Amino acid sequence: MAEQRNMILAVTGAGGTRMAHHVLAALEADEGVGHVDLLVSSCGRKLVAHEFGGAEDRDMVQAVLGRESGKVTAWDADDWAAPHTSGSHAVWGMLVVPCSLGTMSRVAQGHSDSLIERAADVCLKQRRPLVLCVRDTPFNLIHLRNMTQVTEAGAVVYPMIPSFYTLPETVEQMYEQFTARLMDFVGLGQQAGAGV
């Protein structure tokens, strides 16, 4: 078996935090993933509370995953002493699901307002994979230029756009199909290499 990857999953203040649930569940279940660090922004907490119900200040692993997990650790997005601020912290890469356009803008400009942007910046400077699943539309020229800038810096902009060729009949199937495609893209999951 290949060496396990430690991953960062960030959840920011864009609607669609239910997709983060599916991605976190897939990462947690994947034998190729050793550990997942979950970073949720303050606006992300508000949206998790709105989309899942419950209080903003509850445990984010429980809120996003729906249960406790020894494989997932939640970090305060304002914790500047967290290990993610340093390139010496060994992670394979980072997924931001959903990624607000404000977060993408700050990453594009190298401006860190929280642990999320700093962890993304560290991934870029260490040449580690950074995948930003933006969830807003339509895009204005500033958004498009920021997408170009983060792409040139080494990130991947991976919009939360469902596929329709599989003829999904439920929103849940759209979540599952997007998650499978994302996991395949980063070389994880049962569908890895299957060209989902």
Image (tube, rainbow, N blue to C red):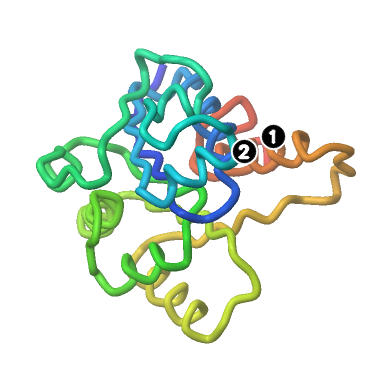
The amino acid at mark 1 is: Glu
Q: Which residue is mark 1?
A: 176
Near mark 2 (Cα within 10 A), the count class, few <14, some 14-19 or many ≥20, is many
Residue 49 % position (x, y): 51, 38
Rounded to the nearest whole Å, what is the CA distance between mark 1 and mark 2? 5 Å
Residue 164 shown left or right of residue 185 in the figure: right
Residue 36 shown left or right of residue 190 in the figure: left
Vertical arrangement, residue 30 with respect to residue 178, above or below: above
Q: Which residue is mark 2?
A: 179
Look at the image and tell me in which quarter the C terminus lies.
top right
Q: Residue 169 sits in which quadrant?
A: top right
Residue 92 shown left or right of residue 62 in the figure: left
Residue 151 % position (x, y): 42, 69
Vertical arrangement, residue 150 with respect to residue 183, above or below: below
The amino acid at mark 2 is: Thr
Residue 85 % position (x, y): 15, 47
SS class, disc 1: helix
SS class, disc 2: helix
Near mark 1 (Cα within 10 A), the count class, few <14, some 14-19 or many ≥20, is some
Residue 94 shown left or right of residue 54 in the figure: left
> 120 and 101: which one is in front?
101
